[in-house]
Image (cartoon, helix red, strand yellow):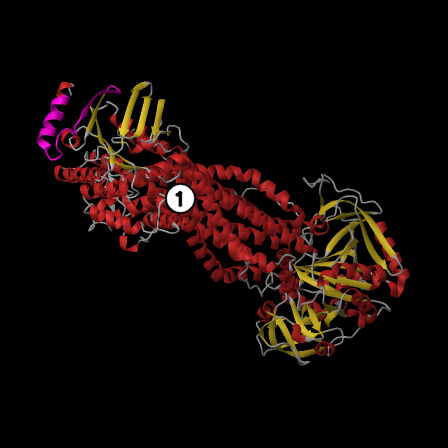
Amino acid sequence: MKKVLIKGKGICKSFSGVQVLDHVDIDIFEGDFTVIMGASGAGKSTLLYALSGMDDITGGDVEFKEKKISNLQENKMAQLRAEEFGFVFQQTHLVSNLTLLENVAVAGYACRTKNIKNVRERAVQILSQMHVNRAKERLPHQVSGGEAQRAAIARAVINHPALIFADEPTGALNKANSEEVLELMTELNRNGQSILMVTHDIRSAVHGNRILYLEDGKILEELDLNVYGEDDRKTRETKVSDWLSSLRW
Amino acid sequence: MSYKILLGANLKRHRGGLTGIFILTLLVAAAIGTVLTVWSNSGVYIQNEMNRAGFGELTAWVSGVPDTKGLAKDIEELPEVERVETQSLVFSNYEVNGQESDSEGQLIDFGSQDGRYRFFMDDLSGYRKEAPEILPGEVYVSPSMVSMFDVQIGDEITFPVARAGKNVSFTVKGFYEDPFMGSSMIGMKGFLICEADRKGILDILHNAGIDALARDGAMLHIFSGSDNMTVSELNGIINENTELPQSTEFVHSRDAVEGFMLILQNAFSGLLLAFAAILLFVVMAVLAHSISSTVESDYVNMGILKTVGYTSAALQKLQLLQYLIGIISAMVCGLLLTVPLRGIVSSMTLTTTGVLMPTALPFVGVVLSFVLILLVLTGFIALCTGKIGRVTPMKAIRGETRKVRFHVGNAVSAFGRGIYFRLAFRQLIAGKRRYVGAVVVAALLVFFASLIGRIDTWLGEDGKGMMDAFNPADHDIGVQVFGNLTAEETETIVRSYTDITDTYQLAMPGVTVNGVDYTANVISEPERFHILEGKTCMAEDEIVLTEFVAADFGVSIGDMVTVRGDSGSGEYIVSGIYSCANDMGGNVGMSREGYLRIGKDNPHIWCCHYFLADSSRNMEIAEKLEAAYGGDVHVHENTWPGLFGIISAMQALVVFMYGMVVIFILIITVMTGSRILSAEQKDFGIYKAIGFQTKVLRLTFALRFGMAAVIGSVIGTAFAALLTDPLVSGMMKLAGISNFASAASVRTVLIPAGVVILLFTGFAYLAAGRMKRLDLSILISGQ
């Protein structure tokens, strides 16, 4: 029996009277690489940010490790983001005046409950693992999109979070860079890292082991990819494609 | 039309920054308008009033003259003299509200002088329509007595006219304007009484004989008959050809008196004008930052406008116009604000300056100064907006200029301990251009605050610095005995309170030097003089001069001067230049032996100056001596009632200055902070997303400003240390003070810098409050 990391119960979110999320019930399990798919405007990113506490919800509850986190105090939420969550955005969202290394290290220092003595060394090590060692002393605008995004992933994992939230992490990258980033995420998941990713790209989605389909603010269907071999990328793509077609995507 | 639309849009978009510049310029304009009003009116007014009241080029105060009318006639008969006007008076010390006067008062018979003086309403809000009738027992005084002795209507002023308790008391009935001795900077004060009272006093003096303490006298207002003659030359001719020197108490030129009357106005107007100039530089620093930020934020729009055919010149003109609208409207409002301010300043300064300065706005002067400022600012804006020419449409649209230009090698890259401080430092370095304005503003404000602090420190809490400048030599208390009383008797009382650690004697007789009247500071221990150059006058044929007297005669160390006293004259070698600001620096220093070559000795001319083991008991000792010996003793501490006026004006200036500093820093921090917050909104979102709390981000944001202020403060403090003495000494010399030397202290270093740093940090922390409302959805794709 898998352990539930995040539980969303009846999550509602509306913008200016328009209901974007409509009583969504969702469980995110430990060790899973969960992917949320859906058409543009279906509410994928909104759901991601609602679950991560990055955005307020207008109804329902969100629990993390069986503790309610919706409407958590700002400092508690900040602590949770520092210690338990990691974020990877479509736009890399690295601090523009910090080097890649500093961007990663700063996240390490933000986590006050973990040992900060070796943050810099850890940051160097993680960046090395992410193959951005050469660019670590450069500023975000001085590196390629792929390098920046890999640094962003390094930032997300430096505190060994329980869950990484990834919002279209390859949306702004070319094919080669996208593949590198997705491989990195898959590798992380293989090593036990839980990931929740939003994407509308099939080739990205097949890296996950569980796909949820969102439409009109509700989760419509779920596809389990565990049954297919991790390396059988072709089959996984076909299955996902067929599944999406059945949902008239 | 398109310009109108664009201008309207720009004004709306940048209304925050423009409002800040409007307020800053308004404050500068109002300050300059007010200071110019005070400055232009005060000089002219004093001159006009002296003319109207009938004061000549030279005024001699005389006493003990057997025939005053005859003396006046002798002087009038000189071809160099046009006419002489006489005012009868009685010289006497006085006591009011428990304080004994430092200088003698002059009881002036108002009887037939209707029209010479103007009288104030009781609440000092303006002038009375008609001069009042002064009844026996009543006295009218200068409003500066309010700041000097806290005098109010109904208070009693006592004049010890003769020994054995022959005191005469008057009740203060009201205030009059004295353009001649009214300022709190002038120790001698006029008291208007009726003819009957003056006659009564003269009767007491006549009957008292040698017990008389007061003296019958007069003021001789001498009008020069030649335009080509200096006052010193006129003084010399009169002294040579009449018996005036035998009865002169002191002589002052019209210019010297005018200088005395205007010291406060000029000094503080000068300081305020300097402060306004500093604030103008601050406005320019803020403008530079605002323009830089505006151009940066409008870069894409400018690129787009260029693609549709707008030229760089047209876009530059738009930027210029939007700032000029703010500046010109601020100047107009500043001019309007000057109207109530000048009245407030005039009434506020009445009790220190003694005169109600007119508030006529020097419209042409103010407008010209505003036009000059406007031209400077216009040129400055044109210079700052020059970078618009470098905007190429595609570069702008691609947003290339918004990339952070930052050299990694210069960065502090090691985080860890002190993460918030290091992060703030890093952000400061990375966005250094944005903080240049804050650094410059902090430097300018700290420079001025430190400069004022240095003057204030020199002045000292009790005005000791000023007193030392006016005294030829230091002391704690001075005691002068009269009649049969001996110094030994008074010393016994002094010793009953505290030990006397040292003592010397000082007399201040009148002498002529090369024919011109001066006060001589005759001292028993010449080594105590404050020597600036050369050596003191140890030998009996040596004399020391102030640098003003030396300059008047064009003599220097080693030259000879002729000095005449009441028993003869002699040649003296100028052995040194010393410092003593008495009589605007118009005095000389001699040794006791040197003076006795030309002057008569008399035990009553000597004042014993004491240094006490416990100088805090000065007041008690003075009270005890006065209670024990009454009119037989004159005690003076190392203070002077006019000092309170200076100290309180200084305090008012410090309060005003820090008030302005608070307003300026608030506006600058909010303006700069808002722009930085807007520009870094996404970065703050990222920090929040990775777990930084809002309060931490606010703290790092505030720290950046704090650090910028630290840099500025160090620069400002260093400049103040380097420039205060040359700048302020020049101003002090106008008041006859040549020994100004500032020193570092808590008030000059820590307080100005600390206040500015705290204000920048605090206001930045407050301005960063909007981070609390930062919505992290800013990071969501596509938003």
Q: What is the magenta range? A: A215-244
Residue B85 colored magenta?
Answer: no
- Observer-nearest of B382 and B299: B299
Quick one: label 1, few (<14), some, or many (20+) residues within 10 Å? many
Residue A218 colored magenta?
Answer: yes
Q: Position of residue B712 (x, y in %)?
A: 43, 53
- Observer-nearest of B577 and B658: B658
Residue B347 occupies quadrant: top right
Q: Position of residue B611 (x, y in %)?
A: 71, 68
What quarter of the picture does the C terminus of chain B occupy?
top left
What quarter of the picture does the N terminus of chain B occupy?
top left
Mark 1 lies on residue: B701
Q: Position of residue B546 (x, y in %)?
A: 61, 69
Establish if B90 lies above or below B526: above
Left or right relative to B195: residue B53 = left
Left or right relative to B286: residue A180 = left
- Observer-nearest of B140 and B253: B140
Amino acid type indicated by mark 1: Phe
Q: Position of residue B396 (x, y in %)?
A: 23, 39
Chain letter of mark 1 equals B
- Observer-nearest of B35 and B529: B529
Establish if A23 lies above or below A86: above
Q: Residue furthest left?
A: A234
Residue A197 appearing in the image: yes
Left or right relative to B735: residue B84 = right
Q: Residue furthest front?
A: A1
Q: Secondary structure at mark 1?
A: helix
Residue A138 appearing in the image: no
